[in-house]
Image (cartoon, rainbow, N blue to C red):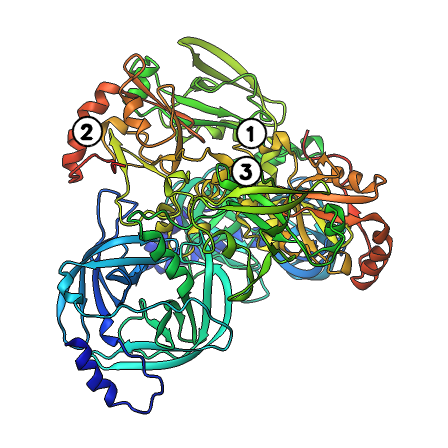
Amino acid sequence: MRFFGASKLNCYLKAAVILGIVLTAVTVSVGIEAERVRKALVRIVVTSQTPDYRAPWKPGRIRRGVGSGFVIAGRRIMTNAHIVSNFKFMTLDKDGDPRKYPARVLHVAHDCDLALLEVADPSFFDGTETLEFGGIPELHSTVATYGYPIGGDRMSVTRGVVSRVEFRSYSHSGLDSHLTVQIDAAINPGNSGGPVVQDGNVIGVVFQGYSGAIAQNTGYMIPVPVISRFLHDINDQKYDGYVELAVNYINLLNPSYRNYLSLAPDLTGVSVTSVLEAGSAAGVIYPCDVLLKIDGHPITNDGHISLDGKYVQMEEIVERKYHGDTVTFSILRERQHLDVDVTLKAAWPYTIFTQKYDLQPRFVLFAGLLFQPMSRNLINAYKASDLDLLYHYNVFVTDEIYRERPEIIVLSDILPDPINAYFESLKMSMVDEINGVTIRTLKDVARAFSEPADRFIVRMVGDRLPIVLEADRIPVARERILKQYQVTREQHLGDGTARYD
Amino acid sequence: MAAFAFLIVVGNVPAFERIPRNLGSIFRVAVTSQRYDFFRPWDKRNPSSKEGLGILVRNNRILVTARLVADATYIELEAPATGEKVLGSVEAIDHLADLAVIKPEDSRFMWRLKPWRLQKKAKLDDQLKAIQFEGNGTPIFTDGEIKSIEVAGYPHGESSFLVYRVDISLAQTGSSFTVPFVKRGKLAGVLMEYSRNSRNAVLIPGVVIDHFLTDLEDGHYDGFPRAGFEFSPLEDPQLRRFVGIDDNDSGVYITAVIPGSGADIDGLKPGDVLLAIDQYAIDKYGQYNDKDFGRISLAHLTTTHAFAGNLRNFKILRDGQMSFLTVHMNHISLRDYPSAPFVIDEPPEYFIAGGLVFQELSRQYLKEWGGNWASNAPRRLVYYDRHQWDLFEPGSRIVILSQILPSGSNIGYEDLRYLPVTEVNGVKVRRLKDIPRALSIPIDGFHHIVFAENPKKIYLEATALEAENAVIKERFGLTNLLRFNDN
């Protein structure tokens, strides 16, 4: 079977204005591709339950959402992580089949917004097609998107050209940036998770766009290098996620800086300004090192390399690597050339900035005082505006706050009760110590409150009043609060695998 | 002459009772002011004009609110009745108390005029009369009632003094700067803020004005003192028992002490409970019973009630033990602030080297981010300003690389901005003047500039920097590459 590429298709359509005969031929070929994709395409109906960070003992709000996905090799269905986040129940629909097939998440990668689903019922795959992956499309080449967006119930196809290929932030996690491809095909809610097809192969997964109010005809897809990385990462049946160099550097475009380092004009690279102590490069790369080459690729003075004929940021090398892989840098340290190997891992302090899914919020509730570790979810849920809190959040990594306090514990809310009637002004402040013990993690809070004491004295960071809780008043207050506010659980400390080390 | 003209006008409105006399001693003040642009510290903004009133008070001084004459370049006084005009200049100004006095160029202007005397006491429900003028000089009188007397924040948010809140419907004429409010022929206060929607006028009361004028009498203005501590109410019975108070209503909790202040030097500590100042018992909300104003905040005792250098006796509870501290009430000078709460009437200092623009951090600079500056300005700078007393030594300053004027020698650095500078060429930077001093001693021909955050450190060739200065001056049309206010 022969498939017409999208770019050829474009030419044919121009010709079609003149020659009616060709038009027929094109229709057939488009029809073939569409028919094949139709057989691979699924509509995903997800019932999810989003944890409520403002009432973390509750199971959360139940919502139903719809997205798209497609069948790939190995009887798996690919879609976006954001479609299946916090899912409780999910069914797959196929076009022309009234049955609803329950499915579950096999692997989910929130850092690159991809997920793989599996279906228990083998008959689901009767009559389905399996889509293969292509490469990175050329600028201005034509692509087609398939999915189940709003505006109707049947499969929708839209067409557009590739507008831009670049690193962009992935809004699902709120922190990660990876390669994206921007297309001008109409993309609407429900398109997410659907394939973008060129030459009969999948060249991307639709995942985000702008609302029409901000920008039009601007949709983004996850390109094949990111998809391949995900599929390779889960080969061991476990998704480890992206690794980070966790190194800051400054460009070497400045002539004075270059002269200071006595760099020969033909020597290019970037100069390291800081190395995250909890990151991969700690103890291997140091501030003032000049990074000249990464895995043999010469680094330009503004941190780019040439990779597969494309001019990309040097981080692209690390992007394509996995936990435990090494990356080799040629560096200049104190005018000496040397090669160093960095064994790559994730940089846990950064996870404070990522939106979390599929996890129950961690908290301690004591005498109506709700203590939670600072996180992006927390900041969003409470629309936090306390300037000191936001400052500590912002500089958590750069100022290495995490070394002192792997978690910043926030008095996030108060369930009003006579025992805590005067603490309102302390909401959203950060806990410094309880009964003289410095609070470094949520577990410290739970431990401090479980120690026998006449009274608990909670001191906050900054010039604030201390909280005094008299132990003999607590049991009665506790009963009252649990009943009054229907609190079913007083703490959730996590599964023991702390996210810090 | 002026007084005579008013008598005629007043005669036309017999319906008012207790029509204030002495209207001839109230002037119209027209001010042209020009603020500096802290994002372009070498530039002034376009001039703007303001109008308000000025009130003749003792010693031939004309009282206005400080905000009327802030950054003034031209001040004109006019007698509303006669239209007679004379130039004036600011003799003394206190931005924290929002008060200033103007001196007319020609003192004959005030010849035979009677100064207003101050009414220094007030109580709730007192009737006050506001005096405004129509464009043609006709006075407008409006009556209002004092709804509350309390200590509240003044415009710069840095100080709290007594205010009267008056329920009144002021006429929509001219500007409301320094509208006088009188009681029984005396000046009870001047308008500081007015909200037309809630009909709420906030007045600077006579007692604060009197402090300002009295301070001036020896020819040297010291400024309002403060003890230099912050406190929180001690409401929670659990906390009260913890700190060892056995009654139900006394004492406040000291949460912070400003380094170098009287409170600091004389031994007050965070965690102390303040029970009394002199003979005045402090309640758990921080209030005492004032013989003139009733229950008001203790801040009145340490500011308006005292002059710089006075002593106050603090009764405190520390670790459950009662003791007494003799605390100096000192004025905290603007020069002591690591980040000045305002920079008004003097241009911002700056220093440009090789296109790198260095400035001292101030709240005035942060306010360039607009009404919501605390959320919009760079977080680190806002944090430094908020916590300046904890983070920096009194009297030292926070120097920032505010921006870079692009040039050949600074290529690659052009995106650096809002970066606190900690060290230059091995010299710790504690004020802007340290920058030129440090740049005069490059290390092996290079300048090393160290920041509090990434990129942490940059290098510049000393010769390149020198060579580029003239080019940058020319290119961006700067008249000067630096400004230091001599003080």
Real-space CA distance between mark 1 and mark 2, rounded to the nearest whole angstrom: 41 Å
The subunit carrying tag 3 is B
Q: Residue at x 31, y 25 (%)?
A: A253
Res. B3 image quadrant: bottom left
Residue hosting label 2: B469
Camera-near label (1 vs 2) is 2
> The residue under label 1 is which amino acid type?
Glu
Residue hosting label 3: B266
Dividing the image into 4 quarters, which one contains the C terminus of chain B? top left
Real-space CA distance between mark 3 and mark 2, rounded to the nearest whole angstrom: 49 Å
**Residue A394 tag number:** none
Dividing the image into 4 quarters, which one contains the N terminus of chain B? bottom left
Report the side of A243 relative to B211 (left or right): right
Q: Is residue A388 above or below residue B77?
A: above
For this rendering, which residue is in front, B311 or A481?
A: B311
The reply to whether callout 1 and callout 2 are in contact (CB within 8 Å) is no
Residue hosting label 1: A244
